Amino acid sequence: MAADPAQGGSAPLSSTSPLKLQAPNGGETSSPPIENGLRADPVEAVAPSEQWQFSTREEDWGQTCYAEIQKRDVKVGFMGSPGEHLIGFVEGVFKGDTRATWHVDDKRAYVSDGGQNNYFGWHEFDQLPMDLLDQISSGKELAITGAKGERTVVSLKGASEAVSRFKACFGKH
């Protein structure tokens, strides 16, 4: 793996180097192309796999259960306090009030109105049924599409365990 010129290393000049083509004729390295090349691909290559996670946190209103996944700048998940209603959330996709379709594989789709939550900053959707969690537990991917065409698709890898733990937490009274 090449040293990062921005960190004080030097760019490799071997004929097999993917960076050699980016070096100007004088042999000096060109910072923007190399920096962009080094930071875009290796970061994705070593990034942890996108996987659903379960967690609980104490919020202002009490214990809150979460099942969520982060995919680059987008976060998708579900939250709820025991005995309360299910809330789906999406961060990094929508602007303003929106209507979104939540769709797992070839299963039944669900439509919900959402708006930006002032406390968390994400868009939340509170008209989603518990059936959607069952679909997520056995599905391959979840697509969320807004009325204006905004769309995100997340893998459901690890969702079964995270959703199972979420449902156990969420179902406590």
Image (cartoon, grey):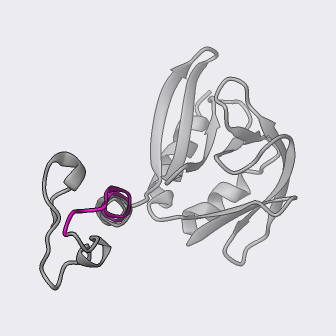
Q: Nearer the viewer, residue 83 or 107?
A: 107
Q: Is residue 48 left or right of residue 88?
A: left
Residue 70 place in picture, x, y as percent: 50, 50
Query: As displayed, is residue 25 above or below residue 51?
Result: below
Q: Quadrant of residue 147?
A: bottom right
Give the residue at x 82% y 43%. 114
Instruction: Report x, y in % for residue 126.
Output: 79, 41
Residue at the top extreme, as displayed: 60
The number of numbered badges drawn on the structure is 0
Q: Is residue 48 visible?
A: no
Front one among 129 and 124: 124
Question: Does residue 99 belong to the magenta stretch?
Answer: no
State whether residue 54 appears in this view: yes
Q: Is residue 42 above or below residue 100?
A: below
Residue 107, given in percent of the width and then of the height, sits at 73, 73
Q: Main secondary structure of the magenta part?
A: helix
Residue for point 64% across, 16% down: 61
The magenta region covers 27-38
Residue 161: x, y in percent?
45, 55
**Residue ID at (30%, 64%):** 42
Please indicate whether residue 17 sits to the left or right of residue 123 in the image: left
- The residue at the far bottom in this view is 15
Q: Residue placed at 72% from the left, 57% from the top?
A: 131
100 relative to 59 in the view: left or right: right
Farthest residue, direction front: 26
Q: Look at the image and say whether residue 34 sits in the magenta stretch.
A: yes
